[in-house]
Amino acid sequence: MAERGRKQKATTPNTPTDPNPNPNPNINTNTEPNPKPNSNTHTKLTANTGINNNTNTQKNIKPNTNANAKKKRSAHTAESNTPWYYIIPLLFVVAVIPLIVYLKAVPLQGEAFLAWNGQKVNADFFSYYKGIWLEVAAVSALVLILVKGWLDGFRAWRWTYYYIPIVAYALTAILSAVYSRYPEIAYPGFPDRYEGLWVLLAYMAVLVAAMTMVQSERQLSLMLGGVLAGAAVIGIIGVFQYLGYDLWKSTWARWLILPAQYLQQAGNISFQFGAHTIYASLYHTDYVGSYAAMLFPLTLTLFILEKKKKLRLVYGLFTVLMAFTWLGSNSRAGMFGGGLALLLLLVMLRRYIIRYWKYFALGVGVLVVLIVGLDILSHGYLGKRMHSLAADAGSLVSRQTVQAPDLPLKDVQLDGAKAKVVLRDATLNMTLQNGQIFFADAAGKSLSVQSDPAKGEIKILDPRYAKFQLKMEMLEKKQAIIIQDDPIKLYFGVAQDHFAFLDYKGEEIPLSRPPAWGFKGRERLGSSRGYIWSRALPLVRDTLWVGHGPDTFTAYFPQYDIYGKMYAYDGDMWQLVDKPHNFYLQTAINTGGLSLLALLLLFSLYLIDSMRTYARGMFDSKAARVGVGILAGMTGYWGAAFFNDSVVSVAPVFWVLLGLGIAANRMARLAALSKG
C-alpha cells in the first residue's frame, strides 16, 4: 500500500548525454538554408504606392506567407543561440536527481510527528535530498533564465498561453500553504515524501525553464541524452534487482548512501523489496511503474521513427531496457499508463507502423518474450499482477455488489466511566471506579482477573477470554489499557473518572465512522485504493477553492476509521494512509480544486497543441520525432497517475519532459514551415 517512490519524496532525474556537444555554443546551430526567392511570386510596386516605380528602384516583395515564414525562421535563429550550459540545471534534474539515494535522519516534531506513524525520527533515503537538490536546480534554472533575458534585452521572451495555468497553479499552491493549519508539513512536505510547497514551485520552475531555454534541436538532443542516461542507470539497477542482486543491499553501496556517523549501523539497514521486482532508486515499485510508463513509450517511438540504423539500434536497446523496467516493476498503475500510451502510438504512428511493420513486429515480439520470460522468472507473479489488473477493471465497471467479510471487531462504545468492546466471539465490559478497572461479560457478570503490576499485564481467568491480552502502560504520558485479540488492538485512556479512545500514539480519536463516497463493497479494489478513494473524496468538499496545504493529505485523512481499515487492510486497523494513490485527487485535496483545474488546463493545452502539430503524421524533423515520443510518455504518466501519486522521485522528470514537449512542438512546427 505504501508508495514511495515510491513513495519517498525527494527529487529525481534521468538522462543520457549527447556524444557530440556543440563546441561553439554562441554560434547559430540552425542549419536550414534560407529559401531562394521565387521571382514568379514577387510583385512589382506601382506608382500609386507612393514609391518611385523606376525600374532601377523597383523593389520586390514576397507574399505574406513567405514573409511570415522568413520572420519565424529569423526568430528561431535568434532563439537557437542559447548556449548549451544554460540547460545544465535541467540536465541535472533528469539525469541525476532520480538516482539520489542518501540517508537523512529527520527529527519529527509537532504536527509532522502527530500525523506520522509514531516514530520520532524519519530515516529517509529516497525523497529528502532529491527535493533539496531539485530546489537548488530550480533556483539555478530561474537565475539563468533571468541572466539570459537581461543579456538579450528580453527580446527573445514571448508570451504563451501556457503561462496562465502555470501561474494559476503556483498561486493556488502558495495560498493553500499560507492558509494551511499545518505549515510544519505544508512547506517542507510530509515525512517520507517531502513534496511541500518549495518542491511544487520547483516543478513549475523547471517546467518553464525547459519550455524557454531549450530552443534548438541540438539542445533538445542533449536533453534527450540526459533523460536516457538517467533511464539507463535506473534500468540497469532494476535488472539486477529483479534478478536478486540489489545494489543498495551490497556492503560497498552502503558507503555511498550512509553518512559517516551511521556506517556502523550498516548491517541493520534493510530494504523491503526482494527479487522479481524493481524499485531502483525511486523508492517504490509503483513509482518505477510511473517512470517507465513515460520512458518506455518515448524510447519505443524513437525506435520506430528513427531513420539512422545505428541510432535506431541504440533506441532499440533502450526500449528493451525500459520495457523490462516497466514490466519488472509489477506496477499495475504503470501497466495501465503504458497501455494507454501504446494505444495512442497505434493511432499516431499508424502510417509508420504499416510502412515499417517489420520493426513494429520485432518490438511486439520482444515485448511478448519479455512478458513470458519475466513471468517464468517470477514463478507466475507477473501473470497474476496482469490478471488482477483485468479483474479490478471488471469489478470497477460491474454493478455486482461485493459482500463484506464478517469482521472480528463489531463495536466499541464509550460512556464516561464505562467502556464496551464487542467482538465476534465475546463481549467485554469495563467500568472505572475510584481509579480501578472492573471487568464483566456481556450479561454484566463480573470477571475475575489476575494482574502482574510489575509488567502491567492483566489476565482474565474466564476461559472465554483466554485469547485476550490486557496490559496497562503509558502512551505519551497518558495511562492506558491495551486490549489485544489478534488482529484487534485497542487503546483506552484511563483517567480518574472516564475512559477515552486513543490511537497507538496516545492521541485521543473519535469512535464515529467517517463519511464515504462510492466503492461500497469494493474497498479492496486496486490494493485497497477503493477504500482510500471512498474516504478521501468527501474531503474535496472543503477544498474546492483552496487546498488544505501541500502534502497535508495524511493529516486530514480519517485515520481513526478502524472499522474501514480492518476490512481494507486484512485486519490492520492502524494502517497509516499517507497518500491518496491518485495524483488528481491528491492535487484537489492538497492545493485545491482550482489548482487541479489549472493543471488539467495545462495538460489539455499541451495535448491539443500536440495533436495539431502531429495531426498530419509527418515526423521528418528530429523535433517532431522527439515531440510525439514525449506526447506518448506524457500519456503514460497521466494514465498511471489515476492510481499513483506525484512523488519527488519521478515528478521532476515528468515536468521537465512536459516542458521539452512544449518546446519540441514549437520546433516541429517551425521545421515543417521551413520546408514549405
Image (cartoon, grey):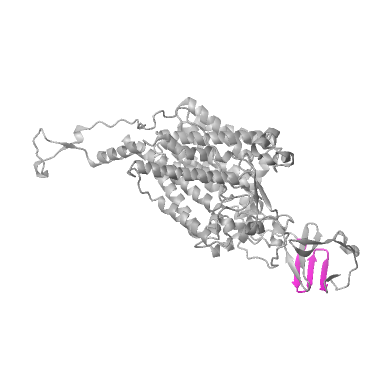
- Regarding residue 364, the answer to whether it shows in the image is no
* Relative to 322, 301 lies left or right: left
Q: Residue furthest front?
A: 261
Most common secondary structure along the magenta stretch:
strand
Image point 78% across, 72% down: which residue?
496
Please indicate, yes or no, whether residue 135 appears anywhere in the rendered image. Answer: yes
Q: Position of residue 227 (x, y in %)?
A: 51, 37
| Relative horizontal placement of residue 574, taking residue 515 as reference (left or right) | right
Could you tell me which residue is drawn at 49 percent across and 25 percent down?
310
Q: Is residue 480 left or right of residue 554?
A: right
Measuring 66% from the left and 33% from the top, which residue is drawn there?
240
Specify start and end residues of the magenta stretch as a single range. 407-433
> Which x, y percent locates residue 350?
46, 38
Asked if the stretch drawn in magenta spans residue 350, the answer is no
Q: Is residue 568 left or right of residue 320?
A: right
At a point 23% along the width and 32% down the height, the residue shown is 37
- Which x, y percent locates residue 177? 53, 58
User: x and y percent of residue 516 in the render?
Assistant: 62, 63
The number of numbered badges drawn on the structure is: 0
Q: Quadrant of the C terminus?
A: top left
In depth, the one of 120 and 654 nearer the eye is: 120
Q: Establish if 654 lies above or below 581.
A: above
| Residue found at the very far top of the displayed protein | 310
